[in-house]
């Protein structure tokens, strides 16, 4: 039995502590925004925030998380009331197939929580680990820059 603090709620799960956090989130907590992409931490589709840092949830054993706070895309807003960054991605039409977008948004969210005014070089460097196979990187960059220009809201 392990306990995870996900999106501000504690969950006790009867799972193998070696189970990747991604599977615990998707299969046991029904939080399906983070996607399985490569299983090797090379694409970023599974990115979530753990202790205010973006991590590849496919590589993190659930049992290693402990009391650290886990946040998924579901914590930022809903389809009816998207968060600021989610709305910017919508406005900039940053999603083509949409598979990578949850991970992209979570990586960007982690950056903006630490640096409310990153320059383009900082954004590009921070976002580099996450890949978009459709090639919407320029729209993703535009969405993040739009949030910076609006002023990051907490």
Image (cartoon, helix red, strand yellow):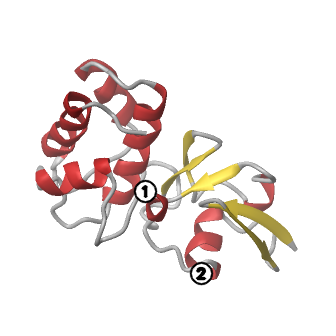
- For label 2, the SS is helix
> In the picture shown, does residue 144 fall above or below 2?
above
Residue in the picture at 14% in, 40% down: 138
List the residue tagged with mark 1: 76
Residue in the picture at 30% in, 61% down: 82
Residue in the picture at 20% in, 48% down: 88
Instruction: Tell me the distance, in whole angstroms, between the alpha carbons under discs 1 and 2.
Output: 20 Å
Residue in the picture at 73% in, 48% down: 68
Q: Earlier in the sequence, mark 1 or mark 2?
A: 2
Q: For residue 127, what is the image quadrant? A: top left
Query: Is 41 situated left or right of 115 in this image?
Result: right
Residue 143: x, y in percent? 19, 42
Q: Depth check: 153 or 70 in front?
A: 153
**Number of callouts:** 2
Q: For residue 145, what is the image quadrant? A: top left
Query: Is 54 situated left or right of 147 in this image?
Result: right
Q: Which image quarter holds the C terminus?
A: top left
> In the picture shown, does residue 94 fall above or below 99?
above
Q: Depth check: 39 or 2 in front?
A: 2
Query: Is 81 situated left or right of 146 in this image?
Result: right
> In the picture shown, does residue 96 fall above or below 117?
below
Q: Which image quarter holds the N terminus?
A: bottom right
List the residue tagged with mark 2: 27
Residue 32: x, y in percent? 47, 74
Residue 39: x, y in percent? 52, 61
Question: Around disc 1, counting alpha carbons within 10 Å, would you say few (fewer than 14), some (14 to 19), or many (20 or more)?
Answer: some
Q: Between tags 1 and 2, which lies in front? A: 1
């Amino acid at each position: 039995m392990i306990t995870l603090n996900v999106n501000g709620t504690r969950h006790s799960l009867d799972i193998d502590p070696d189970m990747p956090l991604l599977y615990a989130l998707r299969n046991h907590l029904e939080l399906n925004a983070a996607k399985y992409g490569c299983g090797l931490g090379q694409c970023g589709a599974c990115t979530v925030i753990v202790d205010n840092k973006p991590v590849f949830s496919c590589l993190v054993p659930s049992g290693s998380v402990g009391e650290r706070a886990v946040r998924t895309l579901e914590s930022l807003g809903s389809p009816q009331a998207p968060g600021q960054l989610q709305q910017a991605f919508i406005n900039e039409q940053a999603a083509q197939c949409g598979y990578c977008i949850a991970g992209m948004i979570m990586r960007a969210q982690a950056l903006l929580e630490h640096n409310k005014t990153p320059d383009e070089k900082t954004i590009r460097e921070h976002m580099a680990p996450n890949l978009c196979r459709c090639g919407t990187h320029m729209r993703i960059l535009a969405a993040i820059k739009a949030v910076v220009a609006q002023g990051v809201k907490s």
